[in-house]
Image: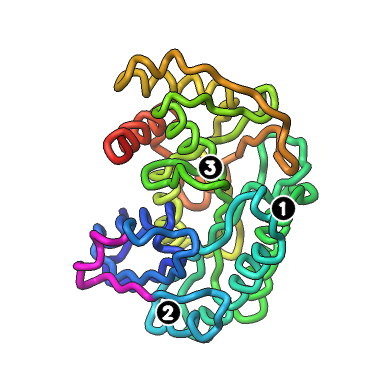
């Protein structure tokens, strides 16, 4: 990790799946780390083991409250903004709250970052921004129309970040995450991501439900690749690499039938009965994009991105973690 350990870094949404992994990695590097979270979706247990670290501080607050954002940004060098309400279905069920958190909260954080004169604001963008674009692989300069309220909010984030870089000189970097998975991703709840949800169901001998015929594909991206990209986005001295957006992915796609096949194979190494669990199919969900595959050429060229985990290696690591922590 080529990151100066003297930097003080704020991770918003630091109690969440991606945020807590980032906090761990930064502390391991010797950085001073602050976490801002309101625990609406983040989990306190993700941070419990960090609380005794003198370089870690937890601020319980809400990005929808500007005063909280200002307090959290005080004395900070860099911000990794992960706080958001994820999930396409959630945004369809409740578009107002998704907008409040993902747009109003995002704007509050930009204002606070500007006022605190932070060096760079790196934020979680989303592959959902590609919307109805049918071109594959997805390249950063070609997007379609959004297919959900969530996708709209994440695209608005990119627009606001661009304006703040041009108007106020705030350096920004947007990271369009493609279906991130890995340790600490919550398998429970109505809006759980597909991989942890399927893992939990298979471990309980329950039939996972695939929406559609299983041919929909995703560029599944292991958490350690995402950590690497965030670190590179903070530490890059290449002026051409800032005030822009990047795909964060592995650059390969896996359909849902293949995914479940791999999960059953790897979980069966721990419990052979899992191989016998049947798969169910349901109707296609509204707002779902049929296929997603990222070009990661821009990230490789400008940031030196070099993802180490393909879907198989990442799934093996994930299955091992879930078996050790949930069984």
* Residue for badge 3: 193
Task: Name the element at disc 1.
Answer: helix
Q: In the picture shown, does residue 215 fall above or below 140?
A: above
Location of residue 156 in the rendering, given as x and y in whole percent from the top left corner: 70, 64
Q: In the picture shown, does residue 122 fall above or below 61?
A: above
Mark 3: give few (<14), some (14-19) or many (20+) Cα within 10 Å. some
The boundaries of the magenta stretch are 47-59
Closer to us: 265 or 297: 265
Residue drawn at the location 53% of the way across and 81% of the way down: 112
Residue drawn at the location 67% of the way across and 43% of the way down: 139
Of the image marks 2 and 3, the number of the one nearer the N terminus: 2
Mark 1: give few (<14), some (14-19) or many (20+) Cα within 10 Å. some
Tell me, yes or no, whether the two marked residues, 2 and 1, touch with CB atoms within 8 Å. Answer: no
Query: Does the stretch in magenta take in 60?
Result: no
Q: CA distance from mark 2 to mark 1?
A: 30 Å
Residue drawn at the location 31% of the way across and 33% of the way down: 323
Q: Indicate which disc residue 92 carries.
A: 1
Q: Indicate which disc residue 72 carries.
A: 2
Task: Name the element at disc 3.
Answer: loop
Of the image marks 2 and 1, the number of the one nearer the N terminus: 2
């Amino acid at each position: 990790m080529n990151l100066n350990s003297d930097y003080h870094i704020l991770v918003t949404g630091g109690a969440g799946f991606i945020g807590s992994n980032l906090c761990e990695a930064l502390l391991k590097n010797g950085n001073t780390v602050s976490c801002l979270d309101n625990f609406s979706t983040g989990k306190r247990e993700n941070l419990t083991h960090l609380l005794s670290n003198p370089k870690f501080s937890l601020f319980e607050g809400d990005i929808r409250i500007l005063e909280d954002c200002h307090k959290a940004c005080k004395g900070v060098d860099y911000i990794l903004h992960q706080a958001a309400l994820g999930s396409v279905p959630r945004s369809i069920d409740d578009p107002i709250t998704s907008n409040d958190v993902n747009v109003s909260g995002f704007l509050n954080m930009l204002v606070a970052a500007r006022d605190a004169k932070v060096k760079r604001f790196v934020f979680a963008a989303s592959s959902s921004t590609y919307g109805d674009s049918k071109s594959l692989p997805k390249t950063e300069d070609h997007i379609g129309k959004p297919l959900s309220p969530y996708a709209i909010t994440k695209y608005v984030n990119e627009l606001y970040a661009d304006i703040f870089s041009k108007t106020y000189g705030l350096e920004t970097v947007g990271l369009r995450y493609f279906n991130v998975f890995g340790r600490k991703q919550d398998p429970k709840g109505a809006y759980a991501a597909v991989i942890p949800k399927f893992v939990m169901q298979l471990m309980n001998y329950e039939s996972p439900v695939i929406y559609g015929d299983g041919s929909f594909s995703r560029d599944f991206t292991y958490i350690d690749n995402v950590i690497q990209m965030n670190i590179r986005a903070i530490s890059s001295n290449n002026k051409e690499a800032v005030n822009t957006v990047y795909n964060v992915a592995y650059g390969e796609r896996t359909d849902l039938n293949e995914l479940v096949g791999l999960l059953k194979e790897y979980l069966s190494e721990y419990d052979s009965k899992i191989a016998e669990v049947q798969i169910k199919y349901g109707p296609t969900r509204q707002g779902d994009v049929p296929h997603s595959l990222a070009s990661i050429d821009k990230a490789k060229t400008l940031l030196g991105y070099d993802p180490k985990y393909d879907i198989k290696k990442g799934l093996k690591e994930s299955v091992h973690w879930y078996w050790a922590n949930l069984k």
